[in-house]
Image (spheres, rainbow, N blue to C red):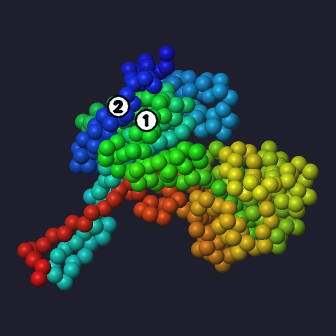
Amino acid sequence: MSLADNNNVKLTSANDNVRAEMLKLGREARSAAKVLALATSDQKNRALEAMAQNIRARTSIILGANALDLERAREQQMAASFVDRLTLNEARVEQMAQAIDDIAALDDPVGSVISQWTQPSGLEISRVRVPIGVIGIIYESRPNVTADAGALCLKSGNAAILRGGSDSLNSSAAIGICLTDGLKSAGLPEACIQVVPTPDRAAVGAMLSGLDGAVDLIIPRGGKNLVARVETDARVPVFSHLEGLCHVYVDKAADLKMAVAITLNAKLRRTGICGAAETLLIDDNAKDTLLTPLIEALLDAGCEVRGSDEVCNVDARVVKATDSDWTTEYLDTIISVRLVDGVDAAVDHIESFGSNHTDAIVTENAQTAEKFLNNVDSAIVLHNASTQYADGGEFGMGAEIGIATGKMHARGPVGVEQLTSFKYVVRGTGQVRS
């Protein structure tokens, strides 16, 4: 028996009417969203604080649930990077709780005035932040997304329907109960945050259909296949990124010690996250001083290097790269390496093979850095910093639901402000239009 069963979380079977159940979730979410949109900042923060306390108090229960998911993942011989994303420990559970505390400490975006002005007619016009409504989040393997997404949606006044992967069903159920109990303690509807209780994939299709108009936005967080399906099949707006093909470009004016440290961190700190570097570009004009130390540092750290011909000549351990390596999101201890003729060539490579996610330059030349930052059209660009900083928590957002790489509405880490829309509030004194 799973932990989800032990906590009375109903798991439907393939024979049940999944669509009917999902439509019910949608109706409940829409009703809850109306209440939540008018909730006070204090009420939302009390719910968030209770959620964080619940997660800390129930760490052993959450880890027990996660152990069931990990056991199943290992039985199915899932990739090490997948298992890493799925794994919880005491430190990661505390990080979840702390992220919720950080979200509670943020300013409430709902009702904030973005701008205001007075027209010659005397009309006073304000652009004011409002919740989007009901947000559906579809994600794989990362149980922490349950806490992050639920908390961010709550703070921004949105009801959330959370559909985690079947691989993290027990973990998500245990975390979801902590969130629901937090809502109840603050007098908010339990349906403000709902964890989809079925592993049936038909639930995803139902969410993508919009649940008869109940869902206003879908956010996918997972692998390429999941995101591609969502972008193809969704009948509602989508925030997403397809892949994290992130690059580090080491310029001829880079400090070698810094370049090595940033490259190792960008690739190896956590290989399974979307902000992990997958390609290293090195300025050909400094290959005599930069190439060998960088390649040897990666190899000695246990990273497989796949390189162009000149890179292969550095060390016999380097594997010759194929064309597909430049477009592969490894999510593993593998990196592709190529020499490029300066910053312009680096920008061209990123434009040709990148995914508009996160790219970094290492250089002491400010002019070169600005050229890179201005010309690389990615959601996040960094100078002298690791791509692993592509994270809402590191941007002061408390957490994130994901990284959006599109150009409409939200781009980069999606936090509480990005989960709001706006409306115009117009105040007059009896004006009529001639």
Q: Residue at x 23, y 49 (%)?
A: 38
Amino acid type indicated by mark 2: Glu
**Residue 110 in picture, x, y percent from top left:** 30, 55
The relative height of residue 288 versus residue 403 in the rendered view (above or below) is: below
The residue where tag 1 is placed is 203
Q: Position of residue 68 (x, y in %)?
A: 56, 23
Q: Residue furthest left?
A: 430
Furthest residue in direction top, as rendered = 1
Q: Please name the residue shown 75% across and 48% down the image.
A: 334
Q: In the figure, 52 relative to 362: above or below?
A: above
Q: Provide residue 419's location: percent of width, then percent of height.
A: 38, 54
> Rounded to the nearest whole Å, what is the CA distance between mark 1 and mark 2?
9 Å
- The amino acid beneath tag 1 is Ala
Q: Is residue 158 left or right of residue 301?
A: left
Q: Relative to 284, does residue 16 appear above or below in the rendering?
A: above
Give the image quarter of residue 381: bottom right
Q: Please give the name of the residue rendered at 74% of the width and 69% of the height, measured from the top-left corner.
A: 251
Of residues 387 and 420, the one nearer the viewer is 420
Counting other residues with Cα less than 10 Å from the Cα at mark 2, is it few (<14), some (14-19), or many (20 or more)? some
102 left or right of 66? left
Count of numbered labels shown in the rendering: 2
Task: Tell me residue 103's x, y (percent).
Answer: 41, 48
Circle 2 SS class:
helix
Q: Are marks 1 and 2 in contact (CB under 8 Å)?
A: yes
Between 107 and 388, the one lying in front of the other is 388
Q: Residue 21: which disc?
A: 2
Give the mark nearer the N terminus: 1 vs 2.
2
In front: 172, or 292? 172
User: Secondary structure under badge 1?
Assistant: helix
Q: Quadrant of the C terminus?
A: bottom left
Residue in the image at 39% along x and 51% along y: 236
Residue 136 visible in the picture: no
